[in-house]
Amino acid sequence: MEVMEGVPPVINLTEVARTEKEEFEKKVSELIIEFGAENLLACMQCGACASICPLARVGFEWYNKKLIKAILIGMKEELLDDSTPWACVACNRCTEICPRQVSPFEVMFAMRRLMVEELAISTLAIEGDRSLYEHGHAVYMTGREARKKVGLPEKPPTTDSDEKALQELRTILKNTKLAELGLIPME
Amino acid sequence: MSDKDIRIGVYICHCGENIAGAVNINEVAEFAKNLPDVAVVRDYLFMCSDPGQEIIKEDIRKGLVNRVVVAACTPRTHEPIFRRACEDAGLNKYYFEMANIRDQCSWAHWHEKEKATEKAKQLIAAAVAKARLLEPLEDRYVELNKNVMVVGGGIAGIFAALDLANAGFKVYMVEKNPSIGGNMAKLDKTFPTNDCSACILTPLMVEVANHPNVELITYAEVESVDGSVGNFKVKVRKKQTYVDWEKCTGCGACINACPPKARVPDEFNEGLSLRGAIYIQFPQAVPKKAVIDPDACIRCSGRWFGEEPRRTKDGKPILAPCEKACPTGACSRDEPRDPNGELIELNVGSIIVATGYKVMDKKQFKEFSDSPNVITALQMERLITATGPTEGKLIVPSDIPKYLEWKKKVEKGKEAELEARKPKVITFVSCVGSRDNRYHTYCSRVCCMYMLKQAMLLKEKYPELDIYMFFIDVRTPGKDFDEYYMRCRNLGIKIFKGKVGGVQKLPDERLLVKGYDADLGKPVELISDIVVLATAIEPNTDLKDLARKLGINVGAEGFLRERHTKLYPVDTMTEGIFIAGCAQGPKDIPDSVAQAKAAASSAASLLAPGKMKVEPLISEVNPEKCTGCGICVELCPYGAIEMVEYNGKRKSKINETLCKGCGVCAAACPSKAITLHGFTYEQVVAQIRTIAKKGVIEEV
């Protein structure tokens, strides 16, 4: 995991604040609020969201609670390099459990939007987009050999095997911001 | 031994599981049935409950019993309850005895049930042995003086005094400073509503000072207290003011005249500025009178009070600058003044102690450096308030001298540029000296909230400020308190879970703060212009001394101890003396006011009837037996015993109003001439013998 890379052993809050003021047009917390996490400031770091977050459970470093804290103190560069938000499975258990109605899931997704805005997109996300464009599945389909072995068609009966549906999906994607970004080849 | 008809009822309480969980009630009851003179033995789940008391009353009414022994909890809380039950049923209430088989038995021996049962038997047997020897006693009454002394003129003292004065009681308010107002007068605004402290306090100061039933005695301290509830005799020392308060109008002319050489740290500004030797405590002081600090006065005219003035060549007297400046002659040095001030005597029926607190000095905390820009939170109050040394202008404390210089120039009409640095970053540190085994183990209770308040006031006024707050954890247990905390978070104040372990002074007077963020699990550091330490609230230095004079207790942490944490929170172990505010323990203004009003109402309900029932459990001298040795006179802690003439001989006599029934005299009397009623020699010996014989009552 590429987590915590670039975060020094001691966090220099003066430097964090200076960067936020002098190098960014807007405070990170303001951007995250604009990108949908309206209740960000209500977080009191109780940790309920982290207790049930699948990302925290499998060892991602910048899971919901920590991501929020880092945003609240104005960290940005360190977060842009990280892939955690793209691993969020949007289970929304954090949204249900949060006593402050912060909706940590919204913070995760706002972070994704911020990353896209800053063109700081992890390979994890690019692979997902590419797979979506090519097969209609964000999570790449494996096991084609196994399907053949048990007598199933190589492709599942989804968009992946439906040329018409796939073309429709590609048309939609070509008309989204994703095409403007040019992250993945779209012929 | 007695031919009287004695029928003892023994009532054993289960106290839910508290007693029954360790003591075999049935076995104890069977045992009690066989004790001499025991007519009835009963047990019940809660003897003190209404049905429980009814069991006892019923037996008395039916004539089954005429002595009552209750084996239950502590007589400290429950003896009065059972005595009343006996009285209600028509039995003299001193025909009652209690055996403590809970605190001293079941609780103490919870895991040794057999031994606990055995001990319960012995305790009950001892109580029965005593009950056989009980005598009927009659309550007595003492007249009560209806005046009250309130010690301390802070917000708690003010409210206690006002409530009592409004109820018609005469109140003497004794305050050690020249002005009333206390610590609250130093505060800028107050949580959780952010109303201005002076705006809500100063009208009350005026109200209490002008109240026809209140006599203010400021710049004074309690010297000694004699007597007891209803009749305290208090000596109060009024310190020497060196200014004639009859003449002083509080105009302040003397203050401006006092030369710059005579300067000491200003207590009211928590040392952030200096004051002269002659000073008025603060501009809104009540009473607004000047005093001279004799240690600070440099005696610039070469003349002290009562001394002949030096004269100029043409014979004119050389007056001190303050003396010269005073338009009313209040500062005149013509008359000598006693440095010990004046001793006055007060007779009061009740005393309320509301002497407040002090905050810990930052000097003890070397880890936070000796920089002037590391300040206590009370200093921060002075720095942000309009009545403070900078009139509320926010500058770094190390530049306050520059500010004062600049102000002096501007006041003299000179053009001057203020070169004081404005802070860009302010850091708050919680629990400095609180929750710390090296200093105070307790939580000071108000720090989290006032830190949040200061941060909020600063951030609202100066949004560009970066504010960092370090807490072990944020404690907001009060009405509207957590909402207040959330308001701070929403302002973008950065809050960290973790304490600051070190502050280093940088060459430019800025500060390197080393903290920890438990949320990210990493040490953090930052450069700050000001560091505010939430230093612990602690008892005033002289509180122990005052408590000793009053005969009341202080706890291990040094605050005054209440009689019972839950049930008697403003009472003390000395009847007639009540406590309120931070002298009892750290608390905020609403809690201090609530306690003050509780103490006032307790004092009022005590004194309003004009007389008070007193237990007859006091000592009496049998003059026929007394040899007049006088040992008891010296030993009595209440000064209740004196030697008198009796049939031409010197005998001791006990003043029954002053006697508190402690029994010291009875225990010490070599000729057994003193009887402590309710605890006679025979009764106590019978109890001891019974215990010594493992529960067998001997006929004497």
Image (spheres, coloured by chain):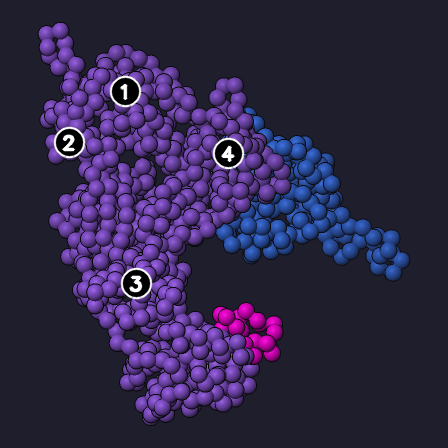
CA–CA distance between discs 2 and 3? 52 Å
User: Which percent across, then down, holds residue A175?
Assistant: 62, 40
Distance between the alpha carbons at the discs numbered 2 and 1: 20 Å
Residues at marks 4 and 3, CA–CA distance in whole angstroms: 59 Å
- Choose the circle earlier in sequence order: 1 or 4: 1
Of tags 4 and 2, which is closer to the observer?
Answer: 2
Chain letter, colour purple in render: B
Amino acid type indicated by mark 3: Gly
Relative image position of residue A81 (x, y in whole percent): 67, 35
**Is the N terminus of chain B in the top left, top right, bottom left or bottom right quadrant?**
bottom left
Tell me which chain the residue with mark 4 is part of.
B
Dot 2 amino acid type = Asp
Judged left or right of residue B11, residue B239 is left
Which residue bears the numbered disc 3? B628
**Badge 4 density bin: few <14, some 14–19, many ≥20, Cα 10 Å:** some
* Residue B379, image x, y percentages: 38, 33
Q: Earlier in the sequence, mark 1 or mark 3?
A: 1
**Image position, residue B562 (x, y; %):** 37, 57
Residue B109 located within the stretch drawn in magenta: yes
Q: Residue at x 32, y 61 (%)?
A: B629
Magenta: predominant secondary structure element?
helix
In this rendering, position of residue B652 left or right of residue B453: left
Q: CA distance from mark 4 to mark 2?
A: 42 Å
Q: Which residue was labeled with disc 4?
A: B365
Contact between marks 1 and 3 (CB within 8 A): the answer is no
Chain A visual colour: blue
Q: As shown in the figure, which amino acid type bears the numbered disc 4?
A: Phe
The magenta-colored residue range is B102-119
Whole-Å distance between the Cαs marked 1 and 4?
A: 33 Å
Residue at 69% x, 51% y is A57
Q: Give me the disc on residue B244.
A: 2
Secondary structure of residue under mark 4: loop
